[in-house]
Amino acid sequence: MKKIRIERLLTNEKALFLAYDQGLEHGPIDFNIHNINPDYLINIGVKGGFNGLILQKGIAEKYHENYIKKVPLIVKLNGKTNIPRIFPIAKQLCSVKKAVELGAAAVGYTIFVGSPLEPEIFKEFSKIQEEAHEYGLPVIAWMYPRGRFVANELSTSMLAYAARIGLELGADMIKIKYNDKKEDYRWVLKCAGNTKVVVAGGPKIEDKEFLKRTKEVMKIGCTGMAVGREIWQHDSPLKMAAAIKKVIFEDASVDEAMSLIE
Ligand code: FBP
């Protein structure tokens, strides 16, 4: 079996990724005059010293020169918009081969746990997982419970189930939401086994609250965070990135990290 080169995404076994696939998932509603420009984002990714920049194929191709060899690329292989309110499914839009040509250090794929189309999603993911592993590429699965059969996307039992599925389907890392229930969330981590867990950012909240959350998830053993809006909707994205990194990589206190922003 080929060695999966996950170390390219880690600094001392920890990670902070910058997600910029929201233009497809949510639309320009997330953006302002600055962060609508991929160059603005890529500059944050490069200068901020992230462990990975998450892009869809289009931006990865068109802005290739600006970031390649400066920050590891994570190509998101599937995606969808939020316009048609259909069964949750995001079909594959980019091949593993294309991601390799783009110089990807990893590939990403969203699994909507509980979707009526789950069998189709699992099958597509499984094929991708095998192909990526043939190249030694790590696979990051966004494990998002969703759809009419999911009563609460953020219940501990749902997140734990999603984490376990990530392990069983062979994800090297999962990206999963946090429900702000520190003690319960330990179970979610246990369920993920040796699959690494990074926590998704979510809509922008107060800096201090987000740093507290970062501190919490690191304390219970997460590998790190995969954050978008929390950073690039910030007035000083590089300062916010530095503060989050201080907590993740240096185990700094929230106050210490806050001093980098204030
Ligand atoms: P944020 O940190 O901005 O929340 O991004 C995380 C992310 O997983 C993105 O990669 C993705 O576009 C988005 O959230 C999808 O979230 P949802 O499906 O809940 O709207």
Image (cartoon, rainbow, N blue to C red):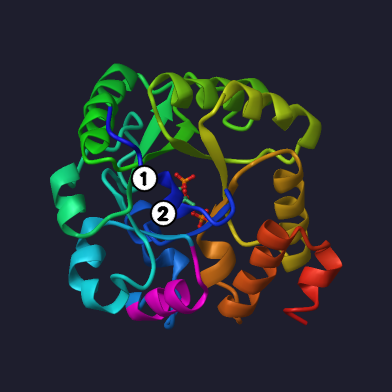
> Observer-nearest residue: 96 or 136?
136
Quarter holding residue 108: top left
Q: Which residue is mark 1?
A: 5
Q: Which residue is mark 2?
A: 8
Residue 226 location (% of width, % of height):
52, 53
Residue segment shown in magenta:
39-50
Quarter holding residue 185: top right
Mark 2 CB within 8 Å of ligand 1: no
Q: Is residue 179 left or right of residue 200?
A: right
Q: Residue at x 53, y 37 (%)?
A: 196
Establish if 161 lies above or below 22.
Answer: above
Q: Is residue 41 left or right of residue 125?
A: right
For label 1, the SS is loop
> Observer-nearest residue: 79 or 8?
8
Residue 71 location (% of width, % of height):
39, 68
* Labels 2 & 1 near each other (Cβ < 8 A): yes
Residue 60 in view of the camera: yes
